[in-house]
Image (cartoon, rainbow, N blue to C red):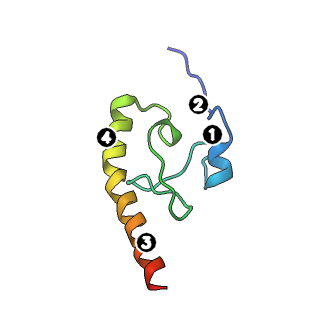
């Protein structure tokens, strides 16, 4: 076995939200980041995840993102 450090290949997460020491976005269990309105899935937060993991994370985060967008639209109409 060989141990290789995992490191994000870009600094995108670092420019958008809190990231761990390897450059991956830090999220809650639903993919929500420290930045309001920003969720991430797949290898953006789970460096060892596979496509199936990303799909599952997307189906979990998708309804939350939709709710957020609807709440923002309602808030905009009220204000």
Residue ID at (35%, 52%): 62
Sequence-first disc among 4 and 2: 2
Q: Position of residue 69 (x, y in %)?
A: 42, 64
Identify which residue, 21 or 58, lies in the foreground: 58
Task: Determine crowd level at label 1: few under 14, some 14-19, many 20+ residues with C-alpha closer than 10 A.
Answer: some
**Label 1: element kind:** loop
Find disc 3 in the rendering and name its residue: 73
Q: Which mark is residue 6?
A: 2
- Please state which of the two labelled residues, at mark 4 or mark 2, is closer to the viewer: 4
Task: Determine crowd level at label 3: few under 14, some 14-19, many 20+ residues with C-alpha closer than 10 A.
Answer: few
Taking 6 as reference, is 60 above or below it?
below
Q: CA distance from mark 2 to mark 3?
A: 39 Å
Residue ID at (43%, 52%): 31
Sequence-first disc among 3 and 4: 4
Q: CA distance from mark 2 to mark 1?
A: 7 Å
Taking 22 as reference, is 32 above or below it?
below
**Label 3: element kind:** helix
Find disc 4 in the rendering and name its residue: 56
The reply to whether dot 3 and dot 4 touch (C-beta < 8 Å) is no
The total of numbered circles placed on residues is: 4
Sequence-first disc among 4 and 1: 1
Identify which residue, 76 or 52, lies in the foreground: 76
Q: Position of residue 53 (x, y in %)?
A: 35, 35
- Please state which of the two labelled residues, at mark 3 or mark 4, is closer to the viewer: 3
Residue ID at (38%, 54%): 30
Find disc 1 in the rendering and name its residue: 22
Q: Position of residue 72 (x, y in %)?
A: 45, 71
Q: CA distance from mark 4 to mark 2?
A: 22 Å
The reply to whether dot 2 and dot 1 touch (C-beta < 8 Å) is yes
Q: CA distance from mark 3 to mark 1?
A: 35 Å
């Amino acid at each position: 076995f060989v141990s290789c450090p995992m490191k994000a290949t870009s600094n995108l997460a670092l420019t958008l939200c809190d990231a761990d020491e390897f450059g991956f976005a830090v999220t809650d269990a639903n993919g929500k980041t420290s930045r309001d309105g920003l969720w991430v899935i797949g290898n953006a937060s789970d460096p060892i995840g596979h496509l199936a993991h990303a799909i599952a994370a997307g189906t979990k985060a998708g309804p939350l993102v939709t709710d957020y967008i609807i709440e923002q639209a309602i808030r905009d109409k009220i204000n």
